[in-house]
Amino acid sequence: MAFNGKYQLESHENFEPFMKAIGLTDDQIQKSKDIKSISEIEQNGDHFKITVTTGAKVLVNTFTLGQECELETPQGEKVKSVVVKEGNKLSFSMKSGIESVTELVDSNTLVNVSMTFWNKRHGQCKSSSFLA
């Protein structure tokens, strides 16, 4: 199944804690939490272009599977990462401790699960899920 298509955000869970973990300010979070983003994915073989439009902000990332690339985060930070595809899932590290997995469930449903890990005694994991 190809990832090509436009997907509109329908719901999200744990949005605020996740956005704080990746570095957005409280003001930025409040301005963006009720905006329904639109993600457009263009796939040509192993090459991807992902455009996320959230209100007036447009974020564009391009990458080739398995090759190091520079991705821009929602707060404008540039991070180096390698995007890998396993089945209908794309995954990459946004920055230390933050992983993102995008799964194409069917031709109409894209699920993005981003996990933030904190190391504490006995280890804990906190996650956020976004459905578009």
Image (cartoon, rainbow, N blue to C red):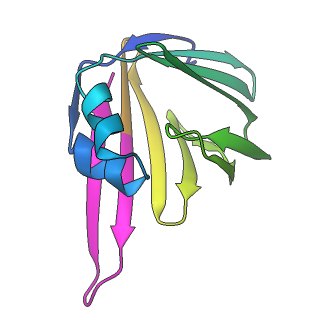
Q: Quadrant of the N terminus?
A: top right
Q: Tell me: 40 left or right of 30.
A: right
Estimate the x, y position of residue 55 in percent, counting from the top left: 40, 13
Residue lying farthest to the front in this orientation: 27
| Majority secondary structure of magenta residues | strand
Give how far across and how far down residue 83 sits, in percent: 65, 44
Q: In which quarter of the image is the C terminus?
A: top left
Residue 95 appears in which quarter of the rendering?
A: bottom right
Q: Where is residue 34 in the image (x, y as percent from the top left)?
A: 23, 22
Which residue is drawn at the image coordinates 43% and 34% (left, top)? 103
In the image, is 12 to the left or to the right of 116? Answer: left
- Among the 4 quarters of the image, the one containing residue 109: top left
User: Residue 29, relative to residue 57: is it above or below?
Assistant: below
Please tell me which residue is depicted at 51% across the width and 40% down the height of the picture: 75
Task: Determine the residue positioned at 45% across, 36% down.
Answer: 102
Give above or below for 63 relative to 34: below
First to last magenta residue range: 113-132
- Say if the magenta span includes residue 114: yes
In the displayed structure, does residue 88 sit left or right of residue 7? right
For the residue pair 111 and 33, the one nearer the viewer reads as: 33
Q: Position of residue 7 (x, y in %)?
A: 41, 13
User: Which residue is rendered at x = 31% and y = 16% of the image?
Assistant: 36
Q: Which residue lies furthest to the bottom in this view?
A: 121
Q: How many marks?
A: 0
Magenta-drawn stretch contains 122: yes
